[in-house]
Image (tube, rainbow, N blue to C red):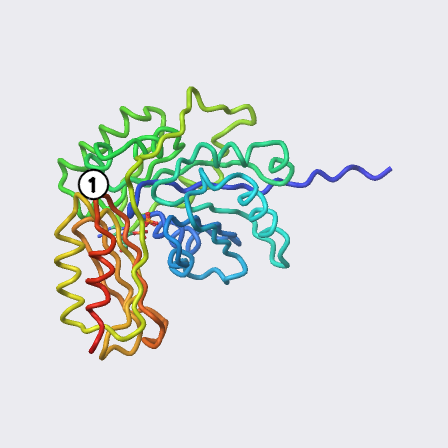
Amino acid sequence: MAMTQFQKRIPVSVVGGFLGAGKTTLVNHLVATGQQRFGIIVNEFGETGIDGSLIENVDTDGIAELSNGCLCCVGREDLVSALFKLIGRKDKPEYILIELSGLADPVPVAQTIMDPFARIKFELDSIIGVADARNLEQTLRDGPEGAVQLAYASTVVLNKTDLATPEQIAEAENLIRKINPLAQVYCTAQSKVNPEEVLHKRAFDLDWKPQHHTHLHTPDVQTFTLTAERLLERQKVNEFIDQYLISRPDRVFRAKGFLSVRGFEKQVLFQSVREIFSLEHAQTPPSAPSRLVVIGRGLNRFEYEEAFQALQVQ
Ligand SMILES: Nc1nc2c(ncn2[C@@H]2O[C@H](COP(=O)(O)OP(=O)(O)OP(=O)(O)O)[C@@H](O)[C@H]2O)c(=O)[nH]1
């Protein structure tokens, strides 16, 4: 009689952390250095497919996007079917990374991976919490998500140390230790942690249950997508970034999108996290409409829509 072949479960790591902390940067880094075939699930808070297109070096078949709300609220069926779809492909992934939205709670997601159905094929390996050394204190003050994202992490990547003072880094480490005394903490810039520190950790046993977990969300965080069909005027874009995005760090937590600016051969990828922003050349031609996702609090959406429309060439 043939011996029963026990199939190895596919390890899954959940990457959480607040808006703009460096989750996509970490996923790209792990894909570039992790030496295995990854399948990626990206959960974005906004409605346009921006986050998925920021994942590099994984062909689109290996990426599943779950949009429109955070995975912790969207429900388990979508996640389970995305997982099974990923392993149904020809080049079956050897490892799966789930990148959560910046407001998502990792616990319901981790529980879904551990439920009896998903457990047939998958194994929760680790919960990675990415934290922004410069903004952690503010993030923890702003709402409950930031703490929950770190509290259950098996490893915390304390990122953006290049943007923080030594005091801010020490304070951030202190805060993390208070929230989660057991986590391994690694300080990084550009989320460059050694893959061995975060993958194949087997950090959760099969009976893991979070204690007293209540699912909390800051009630008033908003997200909207601004779009414009015609090319944008460069000078006006600069003024818009200044006036509506980076000068309101307490209200605009995160913005990202692709802008078609007159005079540029490719679209411009704009990203901001509070008052820090970057502009890069994207791959897409400037004929595509401009799209910008804004996530924040206490914002007048119509004011933003009007201002964005006014950036277009006349
Ligand atoms: N200076 C600096 N910038 C960084 C670092 N890590 C990431 N960034 C930049 O910060 C911005 C946000 O990084 P992402 O990796 O997209 O962050 P995220 O957590 O995936 O963002 P959301 O999915 O919107 O929550 C991007 O413009 C990155 O290039 C870092 O260590 N230092």
What residue is at 45 percent from the left and 42 percent from the top?
71
Quadrant housing residue 290: bottom left
Q: Position of residue 311 (x, y in %)?
A: 20, 69
Find disc 1 in the rendering and name its residue. 135
State which quarter of the image contains the C terminus: bottom left
Residue 200, above or below 239: above
Residue sitting farthest toward the top:
212
**Residue 131, relative to residue 275: is it above or below?**
above
Residue closer to the observer: 278 or 174: 278
Q: Residues within 10 Å of mark 1 (few under 14, many from 20)?
A: many
In the displayed structure, does residue 172 sit left or right of residue 98? Answer: left
Q: Residue at x 61, y 40 (%)?
A: 9
Q: Is residue 225 left or right of residue 276?
A: right
Q: Is residue 236 above or below residue 224?
A: below
Position in image of residue 179 (x %, y %):
30, 26
Q: How far across and down, in percent of the image, does residue 229 sit?
A: 32, 72
Q: Position of residue 47 (x, y in %)?
A: 39, 54
Q: How many marks?
A: 1
Amino acid type of the residue that numbered disc 1 sits on in the rendered structure: Asn
Residue at position x 24%, y 56% from top? 302
Name the residue located 41 percent from the left edge and 61 percent from the top edge.
53
* Element under disc 1: loop
Q: Quadrant of the N terminus?
A: top right
Question: 192 left or right of 86?
Answer: left
Q: Which residue lies most toward the right here?
A: 1
The answer to which quarter of the image holds residue 288 is bottom left
